[in-house]
Amino acid sequence: MNGVTRVGREISATAWLVPLILSGCGWWSSSSDTDWMKRTNEAFPPAQYLVGHGEGESRTVAAERAYAAVAKIFKAEINSQAKEWESYLVIENKGRSRDERRLTLDNVTSISTDKVLANVRVLDEWYDDQRRLHHALAGMNRSQAEAATLERINELDATIAHHVEEARQVADPLAHARSLKRAITTLIVREAHNADLRVIRPSGQGLASSYRVAELTGELERFLTTGLPLGLALSGDYAEPIGRALIEGLAREGLSVTEFSTGGVPARREPSDLRPVLLIKGLVRLWPTEVQDPAFRYVRWCSDFLIVETETGRVLGALSKGDRVGHVSTKEATAKALRLMQQDLSAQLTRRLTDYMYGDLEPSGTSSSGGACPRSAEADGPRRAP
């Protein structure tokens, strides 16, 4: 993920509690719970302060729970937006599992709430000597938090506008996709801050953006289909079915393969006017291997891929994978290995490709894929036709 989507920081309760608890909060052991709440409402009216109440067996526990009560208000608003954002974040996490996409969403949205919660303070405390419970009131000044949040939103709006303008002016297809992706990521962060702003403002009103996540995501998806065609050239064992599985996997993620060749067969281009911007070159092998196991027969598979810019010949990156698979017969082991190859390579290659496309990984610049496959399959034992 780029720098924006990777940001996610935690605020230590101890770090802010120690100086704040010692800052001169009031204590009235003779007051009732009702009297204390009434006094705090007068001292920190809801129109000016966003507050949360906590109680516990110690001052620290009460303060932590009061802080958590404030955090819960913001988290609830963020969660109300999360389902919509998650559907659009799929475009930024090609090849990743649903859990990984959810983790990315949590990291993106947490940077706004964590930042605004840094303004929370312990405003008042009270000890109930009859129940032997500590009470704490934590909160923030709405106007101060609003000013800080608006400043951050304006900064993000400027960044989004820059990325969108850059994407629509640059001629390089990879730079176009990268800028649009960064605009979407930043816009989601911006909308997370806007959700915080709605909580902070008594009116519940946010600040409208000039862009919508859905619109920018749609623009990127259309570009990936029509403006960033891919080529796929495979050689080795089972190149045709493996290649078809890779094409289907890439298509599910919005990426289009317009040229496909296996071995010495000329590339098939569809449609003919879309010349690939990136070429994925791969070698795949699968062969029986001898293992001292009376119950199972084993095959080994390997793959080496390079991702190359067709215009410049520059190598963006590489992927090498391999494994050993066992089953009751060589035929069954081969069929199982082929299924695993299709599934694993489809997910892994899509992920590696988009990491380089979007700048999450720097181009390797090497012409070697690392060599999961031996120079000859005989290096792993006697080879028989698969």
Image (spheres, rainbow, N blue to C red):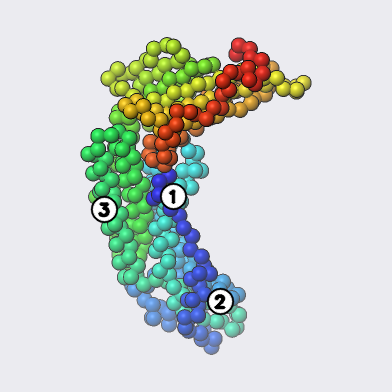
Residue at the spot 60% in from the left edge and 13% down from the top edge: 386
Secondary-structure class at tag 3: helix
Q: Amino acid at mark 1?
A: Arg
Q: Amino acid at mark 3?
A: Ala
- Residue 58 is left or right of residue 217, and the answer is right
Residue pointed to by mark 1:
6
Residue 148 circle label: none
- Residue 222 is left or right of residue 2, and the answer is left
Q: Amino acid at mark 2?
A: Arg
The number of numbered badges drawn on the structure is 3
Secondary-structure class at tag 1: helix
In three-dimensional space, the C-alpha distance between marks 2 and 1, rounded to whole angstroms, equals 35 Å
Outermost residue on the bottom side: it is: 30
Residue at the spot 53% in from the left edge and 69% down from the top edge: 14
Residue 294 in sight from this viewpoint: yes
Nearer the observer, 313 or 128: 313
In three-dimensional space, the C-alpha distance between marks 2 and 3, rounded to whole angstroms, equals 43 Å
From the top left corner, tell me how far across and down residue 291 is, in percent.
Answer: 72, 22
Q: Residues within 10 Å of mark 1 (few under 14, many from 20)?
A: some
Nearer the observer, 374 or 178: 374
Residues at circles 2 and 1 in contact by the CB criterion of under 8 Å: no
355 is higher (above) or lower (below) than 322: below
Q: Residues within 10 Å of mark 2 (few under 14, many from 20)?
A: some
Nearer the observer, 314 or 241: 314
Residue pointed to by mark 2:
59
Residue pointed to by mark 3:
158
- Residue 218 falls in image quadrant: top left
From the top left corner, tell me how far across and down residue 176 is, in percent.
Answer: 29, 37
